Amino acid sequence: MRRKSHKLQVLETLSTRKKLDPEQQALLQKLQRGIIGERNMDLLVESILGAEVDCLDDIILEYQGNVVQIDKLLIIGSIIYLIDMKFYRGHYIFKNGEWYLGEKILANNNFEQLRRAVRIIQNVLYDHQIPLKVQGVLAFMNPESSLTVEDSLKETVLNFADIPTWLLQLKQNTSNKQLQDWKSAIRNYEIAPYRTKKIFPLEKMDTLQKGICCPNCHQFNMNENRHTVSCPCGYTEAKVIAFIRTICEYGVIFHNQNLTRSQLRIFFGQDLNERYLEYLLEKYFERLDSPNSRSGYKNEGIIFDYWFAEKKDYFERLAERKNWKNANISK
């Protein structure tokens, strides 16, 4: 599944432990709408074109010093469709080479951004002698927004209601197998996802709610049992996952810091099982090689699902501990 941006991970994690200021809250809601729109497009593509459709999602490339972020690349036949998704609000008009919202001319021209991305992908394919054409697509993912185009454009413009029909039309085209691996050619230029530069200072730790947050009700009333933690709302989670998830939450909020026992003790709060925390740090996290014993453990700065994505099957088996007999007996 398409991953949340680092900025969204930070804001969502922070919002469970403190009240965001109005600017942060507005940004959080904007990013949440964006990821919902992108995932809706993924679902439409899969449901109409099939799960085996050949595509690349949410990649960042650096080509000859130029960096570009691409929402989706979709190949049908000999054409790669580069899809740029927007979750705007309101009715927009494109005329005389300008974007309008009402009478206001907007500073950013989304078609210029899209064309730049198309040029980069086309040049990558040319360099690797892959004879595919790249077609730019601008898709509005908010059903309540729209774009009216009064100019002639080489790009495809889709309002939300247009997307299923467009995908059905693509389905009629025969998908030719390519001898060249177009995905590998493009991934040669892939760089790591953007990380937010916004830092939450350790000095403000006292403004955060401490403890293990319930993923269901987002309260902090979890009770620790032998093999589980449980919430009065009825949610139960394997203890090992709850602790590791909370360590990751610390890592997301303080993504510029190493993981240290001293700061994690504060983050978990006064009811912390310190021996269990130390055991988990040693078993599941990478100790930093440093003569300084306070260096701690490596912080990936991302949420649990992404940090341990390669061990998904392993943690799914651990999650079954909540069903063990006597698992919920108090420790």
Image: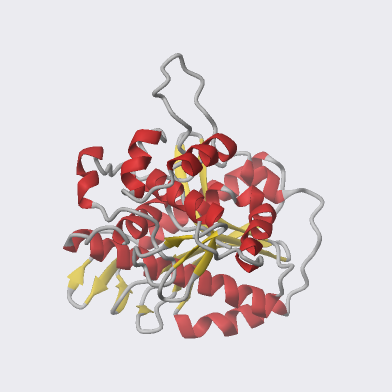
User: Considering depth in this image, is 122 or 150 the residue closer to the camera?
Assistant: 122
Confirm whether residue 97 shows in the render.
Answer: no
Q: Position of residue 24 (x, y in %)?
A: 23, 59
Residue 302 shown left or right of residue 200 in the figure: right
Number of marks drawn: 0
Tell me if residue 295 can be seen: yes
Residue found at x 40% / y 67%: 34
Q: Nearer the viewer, residue 230 or 309?
A: 230
Measured along the vertical axis of the image, is residue 275 above or below residue 152? above
57 with respect to 4 (left or right)? right
Q: Quadrant of the N terminus?
A: bottom right
Q: Colour scheme used in the picture?
A: secondary structure
Quadrant of residue 79 within the rendered picture: bottom right
Residue 8 in percent (x, y) is at: 38, 57
Residue at the location (28% across, 42% down)?
A: 199
Give percent across and percent down for residue 134: 60, 58
Of 223 and 192, nearer the camera is 223
At which x and y percent is residue 139? 46, 72
- Of the pair 90 and 81, the residue shown nearer to us: 90
> Which residue corresponds to the image point at 48% horizontal and 33% vertical from the top-left?
298
Tell whether 259 sits left or right of 125. Answer: left
- Identify the residue at the far top of this view: 291
Q: Residue at x 33, y 46 (%)?
A: 267
Left or right: residue 185 compared with residue 263 = right
